[in-house]
Amino acid sequence: MTGPLLYLTGEYPRATDTFIQREVAALRAQGLVVMTASIRRTGPEHLVGEEQITEAAQTFHVLEAAKNPLHLACAKLRLLRHPRRFFRAFALAWRTAPGGFRNWLWQMFYFAEAIMLADHMQRHGVRHLHNHIAKASCTVAMLASELSGIPYSFTLHGPDIFFAPEHWRLDQKIARARFVACISEFCRAQAMIFSERALWDKLHIVHCGIDPARYDPAPRQGPPHLTFVGRLAAVKGIPVLLEALSFLRTEFPELRVTLIGDGPERARLEQDAADLGLSDIVEFAGYRSQSEVAEALKDTDALVLPSFAEGVPVVLMEAMAAGRPVITTSVAGVPELVEDGKSGCLVPPGDALKLAEAIRGVLSDPERRATMGRAGRAKVVEEFDIGKEAVWLGRLFEIYAEGATHPGKRP
């Protein structure tokens, strides 16, 4: 790359999306100049470490800039120096707006944000724009690319984008992007459904990853302890976990469970735990920094993630790197990371009895836990090391900047 790369997402940095922060750091370690932009300013509850506070301070916040009428007017005037490009972008915004007045109005908001982002990129000499999460922020990225003439790419995660691909015009985003980084084989297959066959060669698999060296697979002793890490939201299936724990309460009287994270369902989940008589064993710990999560994984026997829908959860990689077995659901790309019976247990989503059975099997057999932990760490080191994945992603930026094509699905 002969100039800076700009990373964009809806909120950056954010406690629930630390994998993006790690990816940015890994690309910078290769020598790439990576600037960051966020549609919204992240709330203080998400800035849970010095790294995130530093990143937030040097991130351009698009919505804040667009709310200033003078800044927006000046940016628009600068972009109107190329009127054909400006009105072509406006026509694209019009064509890709979902039906209905309310959706059209949101599209106009996205276009205003794209004006600010395009102007910011041009003034800072950005050569390529990369977006994470293919919903609203990717709409802004697509329009900003058309306004500025700066190419863009994006990382496709799922699963929520696959619930409404027509609404978010995933077809247009894929068609107009230089390339798409899909986080799993499952994700790439979904992208193939919503794109022309001629575009499939630019759908590459780039795993989200972690730094395995950051996680110490140390042995643990003490009463049984389970950990959940994630947003306290309906999609994570925590009521199913609480129900499963109610089945195990008498069998494991010393069991402790720590829920790390926060979200809209917290108050209701705390009440659910109380109603099931679990308040004395379930701790709601709130958000924790990356280093605090790494420490917490040392003091757990297994990580439980009973989600109804996922991409490829980074928290599973973290637990596996720490040498801990994982108990999770067989959804989307999860089986590409977790091998049932080898590095963890896969259960049907929403089945509390099966989840309880899997937890019982893991907690009852220390030797099995150790074997699963070793297998899980080996899998992450081989296929989900952020250093290796960032090298591949960096190479994709270079290949497409040079005008080459067909670099392959994986390196």
Image (spheres, grey):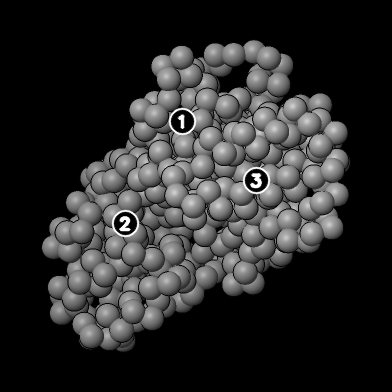
Residue at the spot x=27%, y=80% of the render? 272
Q: Which residue is mark 3?
A: 111
Q: Could you tell which of marks 2 and 3 lies nearer the N-terminus? A: 3
Identified by mark 2, the residue type is Ser
> Which residue is drawn at the image coordinates 24% and 59% (left, top)?
362
- Above or below 4: residue 237: below
On screen, residue 280 above or below 269: below
Q: Are marks 2 and 3 in contact (CB under 8 Å)?
A: no
In this view of the protein, which residue sits in the foreground, 267 or 135?
Answer: 135
Q: Position of residue 70 (x, y in %)?
A: 84, 58
Apparent side of residue 233 relative to residue 244 in the rendered image (left or right): right
Q: Quadrant of residue 77?
A: top right
Q: Amino acid at mark 1?
A: Asp
Q: Which residue is mark 1?
A: 171
The x, y position of residue 10, in whole percent, is 59, 53
Viewed as shown, does residue 54 lie left or right of 211? Answer: right
Q: Is residue 203 above or below residue 385?
A: above
Above-or-below relation of 217 to 311? below
Whole-angstrom CA distance, mark 2 to mark 1, is 27 Å
Q: Which residue is mark 2?
A: 307
Q: Nearer the viewer, mark 3 or mark 1?
A: 3
Labels 2, 1: front one: 1
Which of 131/376 is in front?
A: 131
Q: How many marks?
A: 3
Where does residue 9 sit, x and y in percent of width and height? 61, 49
